[in-house]
Amino acid sequence: MHILSADQFTKKQLEELFTLTDSIKSQFLTDKNKLLKKHEGKVLITLFYEPSTRTRLSFATAAAHMGMSVISTENAREFSSAAKGETIEDTARVLEQYYPDAIVIRHHETGEVARAAAVTKVPIINAGDGKGEHPTQSLLDMYTIWDSHKKHSGLKVVLGGDLLHGRTARSLAKLLTCFDGNHIVFNTIPELQMADDIKEYLDGRGVTYEEEPDMKRAFQNADVVYWTRLQKERLPAGVHIDQTYKIDKKAMSYLPETAIVMHPLPRVDEILTEVDDDPRAKYFDQAGNGMFVRMALLDTILK
Ligand code: ASP
């Protein structure tokens, strides 16, 4: 089973995955050595053509905590044969010869991870492809929403920041359609607005959304605020955009006490550090959940 897009998940699969995540997390926190036998002797390859801290290292630690070996290329753009002109299909075919149990790939071009998946039976996991998708990030995002609100439906979710070039909000928008009654508010500037393909996806799945550029109005009665950084590396040459949307203490005052603020990280300056101590700021817990969700995902794929 390849993991390429958030749209491949059903509500049932998500609920099973989050139940498994809860169980792995509690086993880990009680006696983490017990998990070491789970996938002993198996091998995970991580092939990253783009920078990463959380995704690569949380996959690597998730695998290590379940007894797997991890073989890693952290700058495949420069240090793999891609630099010599090898296609991703050929790279995938070659890696298959080494009998890995799964391969996690991040690529700077949208669709490249799917090209690798098309030529191999080894499970390929999309760890982010250009401005396409980041399905495993959206899994940990949904898990974090569950962890805080104990529900996935009937939520008002504000997606803000760079919705046009960021892949995480795209995948999360898709996953939100698996549950009933969610309403999405896009809170950004016109130049960074969510692309039409996602809006059409939401229309097709009956999920309501609105564009609300005013932060105060967008935050009113929100259950979740999902903030993202300006993806400077994806702006066309010569284009300069000021990320004027920042969450500070004042912005937090617009939010209900029960809301949570999430961010896939890395944060640059779009959430001020003065917000970090607010109990509604969940972005570091969210990153921590990433390892447990990825353990559950690997466990599901490898079974
Ligand atoms: N870490 C996330 C990603 O790889 C978010 C970001 O880089 O802004 O897409």
Image: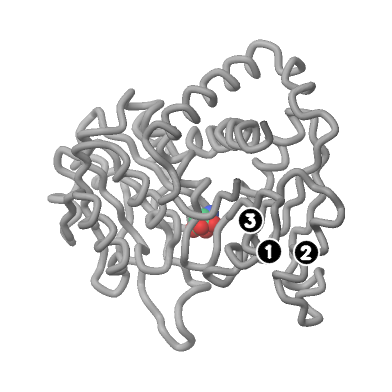
Residue 119 is labelled as: 1
Counting other residues with Cα less than 10 Å from the Cα at mark 1, is it few (<14), some (14-19), or many (20 or more)?
some
Instruction: Give the residue at mark 3.
Output: 52
Horizontally, is 128 left or right of 203 in the view?
Answer: right
Horizontally, is 3 left or right of 175 in the view?
Answer: right
At a point 46% along the width and 83% down the height, the residue shown is 236
Instruction: Give the residue at mark 2.
Output: 93
Position of the C terminus, as image quadrant, is top right
The Cα–Cα distance between marks 2 and 1, rounded to whole angstroms, is 7 Å
Q: Earlier in the sequence, mark 3 or mark 1?
A: 3
The amino acid on which the numbered mark 3 sits, given as a three-letter code, is Ser
Query: x, y (%) of residue 241?
Result: 37, 76
Q: Earlier in the sequence, mark 2 or mark 1?
A: 2
Query: x, y (%) of residue 222?
Result: 20, 40
Horizontally, is 74 left or right of 29 in the view?
Answer: right
Between residues 238 and 116, which one lies in front from this camera angle? 116
Counting other residues with Cα less than 10 Å from the Cα at mark 2, is it few (<14), some (14-19), or many (20 or more)?
some
Q: Does the residue labelled 2 lie within 8 Å of ligand 1?
A: no
